[in-house]
Amino acid sequence: MAAWPPTFDARLVHAQMLTPSVRELTFERADGTPMAFAAGQFCNAILPLPHELDGAHIKRSYSIASPPGGTPRFEVAVTRVQGGRASEWLHELSVGAVLPFTGPHGFFTRPVASAAPSLMIATGTGVTPLRSMLLDAVAAGSQAPMWLVLGVRHEQDILYERELRDLAERHPFVRFEPTLSQPPGTWNGRRGWVQTHVRELWDALVATTEQPPHAYVCGLERMVSSVRDLLRTEMSLPRAQVHSERYD
């Protein structure tokens, strides 16, 4: 039987705003042990905030946004939710603070050695585990196609935009397709929800490769369910080719 993921302390060593509402937090394990995880996994932060029902500390799950790198550091991205005790507290957390975590957890992973061409579909901070997968694959020298469509409301909400565009420019097997649901008139990119672009991008990806692609979907439950139904029911993809994780 596999051992339960351990509890460990980690210190906040850096913080920055990625968008007006999303704060990136870089933690470092206090014991100096390398943070061992698979790209796509998440960890649980145990916050010193009492739960309304039982008084126990609040626990929140966050996908690891950074790739595995053999260091004690890892990154998470937290959206500030108005009235959300945990997110507001984490947005005010000072560098140097120490929090207990458990992890890694989760099976939403993409092993590089056996990775198929992939269409990655995300909204908001659902891009964080996909960013980890992308960076992990590039660092390992994989050249299996990875196409990412990221849906947000406004251009200022595109997480990791400069980094993702740079990856796409430097690596022909990476494609980055942000889409805005509330675009300005000057926006020249994709418009609307991610669901409206999935079939087109999937067909284009299939045309570039002989190996059956896989889909990786992450975001709010409503989007994940809609895209999963499109892929599995309308497009008749086998279950094994569709991987998903929701965070609400």
Image: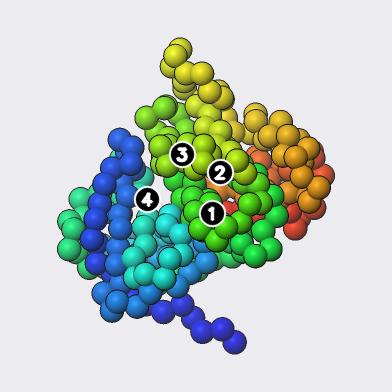
Q: Residues within 10 Å of mark 1 (few under 14, many from 20)?
A: some
Does 10 sit above or below residue 115?
A: below
Three-letter code, disc 1: Val
Residues under labels 1 and 2: Cα distance? 8 Å
74 lies left or right of 233: left
- The residue tagged 2 is 171
Label number found at residue 77:
4
Task: Out of 217 and 116, give the one closest to the viewer.
Answer: 116
Q: CA distance from mark 1 to mark 4?
A: 21 Å
Q: Amino acid at mark 3?
A: Asp
- For the residue labelled by badge 1, is the local secondary structure a helix, a strand or a loop? helix
Do the numbered discs 1 and 4 sit on residues whose CB atoms are within 8 Å? no
User: Pointer 1 and pointer 2: residues touching (CB < 8 Å)?
Assistant: yes
Could you say whether the residue bearing mark 2 is in a helix, strand or loop?
Answer: loop
Query: Which residue matches tag 3?
Result: 166
- Mark 1 highlights which residue? 138
| Residue at (44% x, 45% y) in the render | 125
Q: Nearer the viewer, mark 1 or mark 4?
A: 1
Q: Are marks 4 and 2 in contact (CB under 8 Å)?
A: no
Residue at the image position 73 percent from the left and 34 percent from the top: 204
Residue 187: give x, y in percent of width and height: 47, 18
Quarter of the picture containing the N terminus is: bottom right
Q: Secondary structure at mark 4?
A: strand
Q: If you read the primary sequence from the N terminus, does the residue marked by circle 4 or circle 2 appear first?
A: 4
Q: Earlier in the sequence, mark 1 or mark 4?
A: 4
Tell me where residue 232 appears, x and y as whole percent: 76, 46
